Amino acid sequence: MKMIEIARLRPTQVTHGEREIRAKTKAYRSLSGHELQMAIAEKPIPIVLGPRTAPYAIDHHHVATALWHADIKSMPVVLVRDLSLLSRAEFWLTMENHQWTYPYGGDGQRVAFTDMHEHVWELADDEFRSLSASVRDAGGYEKTAVPLEEFRWADFFRRRLPMSVSDGDFEALVRKAVRLAKSRAALGLPGYIGPAD
């Protein structure tokens, strides 16, 4: 499996969830030796090569950032597509057409591709992105292969729930969001499982 330095990975999104990253970083730091190597190997980063053969991560930004914070400097990647011969404009158009990028800030406003960060660990915190992951982990919806599903759920919660500030508030918010995720209001979102019978 091809390895790449995390510092070389270019992000294709503007935000990530700091709570999720802290939890993943703690998990990686608790491992060592073979266990750590296996944990790293099971989450290779899918990449697309862009102009000047720069590697763009199209998923697992949280994993890459958590590994970086855990002082792991390289990780395995899987090449999805080589778009290095395209112009910068053609590259980003192709990335959008394939839903391999999410150029929106935590406020839902679009960000210019020229303003996207250079490194995965520089992304802005979006509490609702952490909330969407926590709701999925709590059984509020199922993980699917739909691109950017966590962002769709984050935007759904953003329009309906206030954001918490403390860890206690966040846990209560997750419980509330799980109920919301199973309500008819979420019908049509990827991984929707509906109310329990």
Image: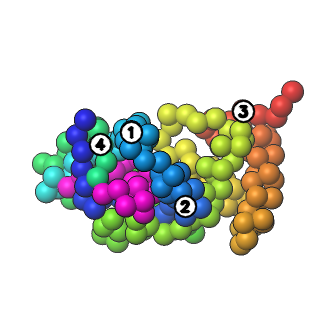
Residue 193's label in the rendered image is: 3
Q: Is residue 185 left or right of residue 87?
A: right
Task: Tell me the residue that label 2 is attached to.
Answer: 22
Find residue 168 and report its image quarter.
bottom right
Give the image location of residue 118, x and y in percent.
30, 67
108 and 138: which is toward the camera = 138
Residue 130 left/right relative to 53: right
Q: Which residue is mark 1?
A: 34
Query: Quick one: label 2 or label 3, which is nearer the N terminus?
Result: 2
Query: Along the polypeptide, which appears first: circle 2 or circle 4?
Result: 2
Report the amino acid beneath label 3. Ile
Mark 4–mark 3 Cα distance, whole angstroms, equals 32 Å
The reply to whether discs 4 and 1 touch (Cβ–Cβ < 8 Å) is no
Residue 45 visible in rendering: yes
Q: CA distance from mark 2 to mark 1?
A: 22 Å
Q: Residue sitting at 65 percent across and 43 percent down? A: 136
Can you name the residue that lies furthest to the right here?
Answer: 197
- Name the residue: 71% across, 72% down: 165
Q: Earlier in the sequence, mark 2 or mark 1?
A: 2
